[in-house]
Amino acid sequence: MIGIFDSGIGGLTVASAFREKLQGYDIVYFGDTARTPYGTKSPETVISYSLQNAEFLISQGAKIIVIACNTASSIAAGAIVNKFDIPLFEVITPAVNLSIQASRNFQIGVIGTRATIKSNIYEQKILQANPNARVYSVACPMLVPLVEEGWFKRPETRMIVKKYLHPLKVRKIDTLILGCTHYPLLKNIIQIKIGKRVKVIDSAEGVVEDVKRFLKNNPKVDGTLSKKEDHKIFVSDITEQFEKTAKVTLKRNVTLEHITIS
Ligand code: DGL
């Protein structure tokens, strides 16, 4: 199984890309809905939750893990690598690579949770790839709750997105990284507010490509992955709202299984 986790709904945008682009593979998804959001928590807490999440996915038969959360990717990837002997994929590196490929003038904007922006990981990785790039980052803490509420098209959401993107518009960025897996669900509004000339980067397809490449080069690991098109979604708290938003995100009915994690 391919194990995927996020703090909640956002990682379903990544799980959905796996379903479409890596067909046949079994997926076990865990959304830590009881403890979401991660983006406002301390690094110690995000690390401890992420280790528990990885352990849970492994107990369910995951043979590779995808951290479908920028916050956990930026803060906890190292801790997971140190503790578990399992191939691990995160969403920061593919987003950085896609932005470097897409950018013409290397004025790159990044939006993410407070924790991701504070970690400075995007700026570090982009500058490693191109020392002449300019990176402008904005934390957008109100976007995750708007997505979790399913406020995808509300005028209030449009107004808040516009306000967050204003400093990036002023800088005339040509590429914008969606540095949070919740944000692809607001991609239409974000694209309109930042302007159609700006290339908006979502890490989902990039991370699927990373995994595909890895499996091609590591047929032994590929052989350990079950392929019965079985997709399981576990959450640490079941709410009506999560079920609704999950349906919209995956464009189909979903059955959620509840687990207690601690
Ligand atoms: N979806 C997550 C991310 O990519 C985190 C949202 C949160 O829990 O704050 O950062």
Image: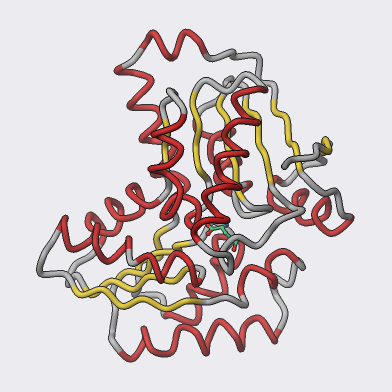
60 or 161: nearer the viewer = 60
Q: In which quadrant of the rendered image does the N terminus lie? A: top right
Query: From the viewer's perspective, is residue 57 above or below residue 34?
Result: above
Outermost residue, right direction?
Answer: 240
Query: From the viewer's perspective, is residue 98 above or below residue 40?
Result: above
Give residue 199's position: percent from left, percent from top: 35, 66
Give residue 162's position: percent from left, percent from top: 53, 87
Residue placed at 57% from the left, 47% from the top?
48
For residue 50, which quarter of the picture? top right
The image quadrant in which ligand 1 is located = bottom right
Residue placed at 82% from the left, 41% from the top?
253
Query: From the viewer's perspective, is residue 157 above or below residue 103?
Result: below
Q: In which quadrant of the rendered image does the C terminus lie? A: top right
Residue placed at 57% from the left, 75% from the top?
141
For residue 60, which quarter of the picture? top right
Q: Is residue 24 left or right of residue 165?
A: right
34 or 146: nearer the viewer = 34
Residue placed at 82% from the left, 35% from the top?
257
Give residue 260's position: percent from left, percent from top: 80, 39
